[in-house]
Image (cartoon, grey):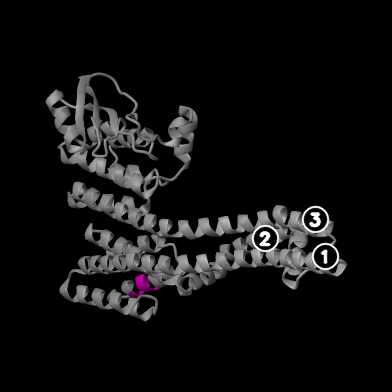
Amino acid sequence: MPQFSYKARKRSGELVEGVLEVMDRPAAVAQIERLGLFPIAVDTGKAVAPTLRGGQKTDWMSLLPPTLRAQFQKKRKPKLQELATFTQQLANLLQSGMPLATALNSMTYLETKGIPSDVSRELRQEVTEGRSLSDAMARQPRVFSELYVNMVKAGEQSGALVDVLRRMADHFDKFAQLQSKVTSAMVYPAIVICVGFGMIIFFLSFVLPKFISLFGNAGFTQLPTITLILINISNGFQRYWWLIGLVVVTVVILFKRFQSTQTGRRAVDQWKMKAPIVGRVICLNLYGQFARTLCTLLKNGVPVLTALKITEQVVPNVIIKEATIRTRDAVTDGKSLAQPLAASKVFPRLMVDLVKIGEETGNVSDALNNVAETYENELNLALRVMMNVIEPVLIIGMALIVGFLLAAVLDAMFSMVSNIGSGMQSGE
């Protein structure tokens, strides 16, 4: 089958180059349009490495040598958005009527960021040798999780692989968006805290010693109490900074070791869920993740016990994991899904009630979808509330610290000027 090299633009304006293996040029143009691209040029030719032009930002990995970039990509686990793009591309190719092996061959030329073309090439080789796509993906656990493999297997068994891939792409895309929102909400406080600590360390290490020498040269020894406190803090930091660093490193190491134990991780995860302000955000994110994952698996034909097992592995919180294990054991014994969820005392009443209604109507997946959307919407609101609370708290905290530093220095300066004035008057 002939190959056609093409140049096309994404909706964002980004220029993409690649190669398709199709019957003729019109088929190539049609295939490019199905991929959501706008074709610019389509010619017979060999594979061309995808490029970014027109002033677009390039990925930092593209600056690495090809060998080093390939090694890095093989070790790095793909991000959710990268997995969503890969899945959507494969679904588009299969939707166009391409055989699976041909679609995987085309995927080698549509290299997705974070997923090297070797992945598609190895999948094509496995499929050509007679293995199913799910079995081939199971041999690459770094890229394809158990959730991914089981959903593909369910799609193969039901004959609805394209629909499953599209749902899965949507699933990963929604999770990526939620992760991005949570991460973005944490960036501002982290920057403010880091800048604040940096400013304090700079002041204590470089600025305050100059003022101390100024006071000493002026013969001013009767310093205000607030200034003496700040000077002692500065001297202690300069003399024992290594000890402070050692204590911090030791505390971090001990905390990591404690967290690596089952008891420690459970205690930390429980504290996260009960933490003020942030705890609500964490809980809503966990509930939404649990419901969205279980909903996606059940909707794509994965058996409920298998779906619960996979969900247990996906959710990153020990408390939720333990509740999921108990739920799976209860369902194995013949109980409904809502009963053990309620008995766990972990999941909110709204989730339990919606799942119970879903069981009564015979549509648990839709009920779980409603649960996921409910908690995802609440998460967006909780993130805004959290930022509205954290921002003024950080600003007030930084203002108090800066005020203390300025008060300590200015009080000493005013006292020094006052003493000099008093001395001049007494001299007269």
Quarter of the rendering occupied by the C terminus: bottom right
Q: Is residue 132 above or below residue 375?
A: above
What crowding class fits label 1: few (fewer than 14 Cα within 10 Å), some (14-19), or many (20 or more)? few
Q: In the image, what residue occupies the spot 28% across and 53% down?
A: 151
Q: Is residue 329 magenta?
A: yes
Q: Amino acid at mark 1?
A: Met
Q: Does residue 58 appear left or right of residue 27 in this picture? A: right
| Disc number placed over residue 424 in the picture, else none | 1
Give the Cα separation between the discs numbered 1 and 3: 22 Å
Judge whether residue 2 can be spotted in this image. no
Q: In the image, what residue occupies the spot 64% across and 67% down?
A: 404
Q: Amino acid at mark 2?
A: Val
Q: Are marks 3 and 2 in contact (CB under 8 Å)?
A: no
Q: Are marks 1 and 3 in contact (CB under 8 Å)?
A: no
- Circle 2 is placed at which residue position? 248
Mark 3, secondary structure of its residue: helix
**Looking at the image, which residue sits at the far right?**
427
Report the magenta stretch's main SS. helix
Give the Cα separation between the discs numbered 2 and 1: 50 Å
